[in-house]
Image: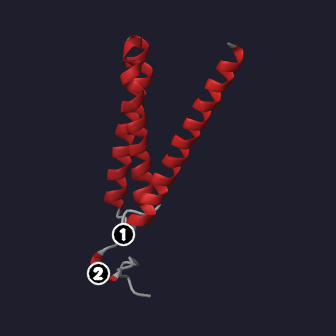
Amino acid sequence: MSSESHEVHHEGGEHETMTRKKIWKVFFILLAITCVEFVIALVIVPGHPEYLRVANPVYIALTLLKAFYIVAYFMHLKFEKLGLALAIIVPIIFIIGLILVLTNESHHWIDLRG
């Protein structure tokens, strides 16, 4: 066996390998996002409940950003645009649909009680 690197090279340069440096970079990005989420959830909102209305969308956006990084880099879908889009967009569509159905159902139960 040769002592050369065992990295796989693809034609066209559209795929990259995850180097140790890139893995640590993504790790620290995810760590920073998680730290911001913890500060929002454990420091800002309990101290200032009036920020809850603003904190929730920010918290959701940060969580979606973390999901993007995990899917793009650790599931290796960064260069597969269709796979990445489907992995993020399809669950979001189902979640929005579930929220709409549950909201409609809750109005039905409220109308029955009234």
Up-down relation of residue 102 to residue 88 (above or below) = above
Q: Please name the residue that numbered disc 2 is placed on.
A: 12
Do residues under tags 1 and 2 come within 8 Å of each other at their CB atoms? no
* Quadrant holding the C terminus: top right
Up-down relation of residue 75 to residue 64 (above or below) = below
Q: Residue at x 34, y 72 (%)?
A: 15
- The single residue placed furthest to the bottom in the displayed view is 1
Tell me the kind of residue under disc 2: Gly
Q: Please name the residue that numbered disc 1 is placed on.
A: 17
Secondary structure under the numbered disc 2 in the rendered image: helix
The image quadrant that residue 107 belongs to is top right
Return the residue nearer the eye: 108 or 23. Answer: 108
Can residue 109 be seen from the camera position used here?
yes
Question: Dot 1 surroundings within 10 Å: few (below 14), some, or many (20 or more)?
Answer: few
**Percent of width and height locating residue 8:** 39, 79
Return the residue nearer the eye: 15 or 35. Answer: 15
* Quadrant holding the N terminus: bottom left
Q: How is the protein colored in the picture?
A: secondary structure
Tell me the kind of residue under disc 1: Thr
The image quadrant that residue 53 belongs to is top left
Residue 103 vs residue 59: left or right? right
Q: Residue at x 55, y 43 (%)?
A: 97
Q: Residue at x 51, y 41 (%)?
A: 96
Can residue 76 be seen from the camera position used here?
no
Question: Dot 2 surroundings within 10 Å: few (below 14), some, or many (20 or more)?
Answer: few
**Percent of width and height locating residue 94:** 55, 47
**Percent of width and height locating residue 99:** 55, 36
Up-down relation of residue 43 to residue 28 (above or below) = above
The image quadrant that residue 5 belongs to is bottom left
**Percent of width and height locating residue 58:** 37, 31
